Image: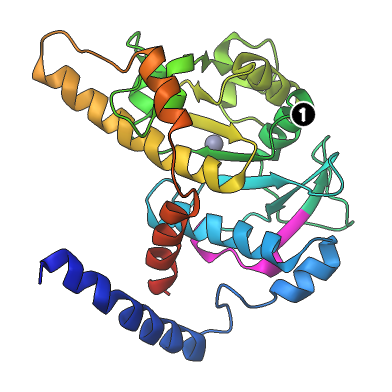
Amino acid sequence: MTKLRFQRLLLPVAAASLLAVATAATPQAPTAGVAAAASRLGVDAQVIDDLVTANRILAHENIVDGYGHVSIRHPTRPNHFLIARSVAPEFVTADDIIEYDLDSNAVAPGEAREFIERFIHGEIYKARPDVGSIVHSHSPAVIPFSVSTVALRPVFHMAPFLAAGVPVWDAALVNDPEAKGILVRNRALGASLAATLGKKPVALMRGHGSVVVSRELKNTVKNAIFLETNARMQSAAIALGGPIKYLSMEEAMATLSGRGDPDRAWDYWKRRALAKH
Ligand SMILES: [Zn+2]
């Protein structure tokens, strides 16, 4: 039996036992409070479960750490979005999910712990009716491309979404009194970022991080993970020296149209992330 196959056989057992321990040790298991949050926010329980899971996956895959966030457009109120309150993504639970309007005002009054950069989400949803989910992160391999003249381009088949080009937003070029703080602290800065993103699936933010957008949450999470992987690989290819043959647009399009089971990677990342708790 190969080592990989052996690990696959063991994994469900290990995950189940770890989850059992986690459930006993902490009331904040990933599924805790999902039904109540779903009722409070007017969505199916699966929507909440997936959004909490997305937080856990992005943390486990080192795309986010103490900072960074993921949101979805509200499934039945398209002028609203759902995102956690200001908590490290690894510790987000269903109780932390908050509903916002597209001006990034919390629907329920009195919310005190909000992400400073929630305007990223509100302004992109406003500008992009096709977008259903957004990841904002400071994943480290991507950031060098935000300060370099070297463009981020697709080097492997899991990052074909980069073939469309990756714009870089620079807060320093925005005429706003809060721009020097780099963070997207208000609606004007969020709108400027959304304008730079345009119709693309990814934009870098100079000296800061990135945004990844798409219609489906699972796809956005996948692209955020492979954005980081691609950046690492591209830096390695550049370090090798010599010319680099990136994926062509034709190859990228063919790769995008040939995808199999969209849930396979999600299930893999989910099991890994939840086994940790
Ligand atoms: Zn940020």
Q: Is residue 177 magenta?
A: no
Quarter of the figure that contains the N terminus: bottom left
Ligand 1 found in image quarter: top right
Q: Position of residue 106 (x, y in %)?
A: 83, 49
* Residue occupied by mark 1: 129
- In the rendered structure, the answer to whether residue 119 lies left or right of residue 271 reads right
Q: Amino acid at mark 1?
A: Pro
* Residue 88 in sight here: no
Q: Which residues are magenta?
A: 88-98
- Residue 39 x %, y %: 83, 69
Is 242 drawn above or below residue 97 in the view shown? Answer: above
Colour basis: rainbow
Q: Is residue 252 above or below residue 10?
A: above
**Residue beneath the point at 30% across and 75% down:** 11
168, 177: nearer the viewer: 168
Judging depth in this view, the residue of 170 and 204 nearest the camera is 204
Instruction: Please count the marks in the image.
Output: 1
Q: Is residue 32 above or below residue 174?
A: below
